Amino acid sequence: MSRITINRVLLAFIGLVLLALGVAVLIGSLDLQRHWDFHLPSSWPFSGSKDVLLTRHDRRLYRHRDWWWPVVIAGLAVIFLVSLWWLLAQFRTRRMRQLRIDSGDGQGALISGRALENVLAAEAEAYEGVEWAGAVLVALHGQPQARLVLGLAPHATPVELVTGLDAEVLAHARTSAGLGELPTEARLRAVRHRASRVT
């Protein structure tokens, strides 16, 4: 399981727990069980509009310690900010929008990352043994890296295919973009064809 998947599963789990807690507080604070005439289990934490998260005893428990409530509030604020950062990080992408290449005049030129992705995908798809292809260009430590997903034809040999793609398609991309190297991660997937009946 990838790190991105683990992050999203954890976020979903934490979100569901917080949603359940919020619903419990909402049902109790609005006294919905009385208005809508339904009963809650005896273990339900908030059963009435006068219920509170912290009782008077809980609130006064550490009153003689001046540092207690500021530390609790600061801790909750830090947890909130870290959670917000974690959530926003899931939507961040390392995808390269532009790539600077040496145009030979000493100034360079910018090409669209999407354009290079389209060229890579088209050339990979035109290669013998590849039925479909997708390409993404990402920045890894400030350097471009290609990620290819290839659907292999039944007769394709993965080793020969990867070697050929590196020697032709990726070499062409490196030359066109003026890159000394273009690290590439390729994921190969077998294409399943529906069996046809012969009569």
Image (tube, rainbow, N blue to C red):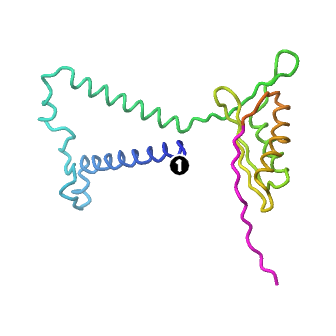
Instruction: Report crowding for label 1: few under 14, some 14 to 19, many 20 or more residues within 10 A (C-alpha).
Output: few
Residue at the farthest front position: 159
In the image, 90: left or right of 59?
A: right
In the picture provided, is 11 more to the left or to the right than 29?
Answer: right
Give the farthest residue toward the right: 104
The C terminus sits in image quarter: bottom right
Q: Position of residue 130 (x, y in %)?
A: 80, 54
Which sits in the foreground, 67 or 31?
A: 67
Q: Amino acid at mark 1?
A: Met
Left or right of 57, for residue 129: right
Q: Which residues are magenta?
A: 184-199
Q: Is residue 1 above or below residue 69?
A: below
| Picture quadrant where residue 183 is located | top right
| Residue 94 lies in the magenta-colored region | no
Image x and y of residue 189, in percent: 70, 55
Q: Nearer the viewer, residue 41 or 163?
A: 163
What residue appears at the point 75 percent right and 28 percent down from the top-left corner?
A: 99
Residue at the bottom extreme of this rendering: 199
Residue at 73%, 47% in the rendered image: 134
Total of numbered circles in the picture?
Answer: 1
Q: Secondary structure at mark 1?
A: loop
Residue 127 lies, in percent from the top left, at 84, 50
Q: Nearer the viewer, residue 156 or 140?
A: 156
In the displayed structure, 108 sits above or below 32; it is: above
Spot the residue most to the top: 106
Answer with left or right where residue 44 lies relative to residue 161.
left
Q: Quadrant of residue 100?
A: top right
Magenta stretch: residue 186 in it?
yes
Q: Residue at x 85, y 41 (%)?
A: 168
Pointer 1 residue: 1
At 72% across and 45% down in the image, what residue appears? Answer: 148
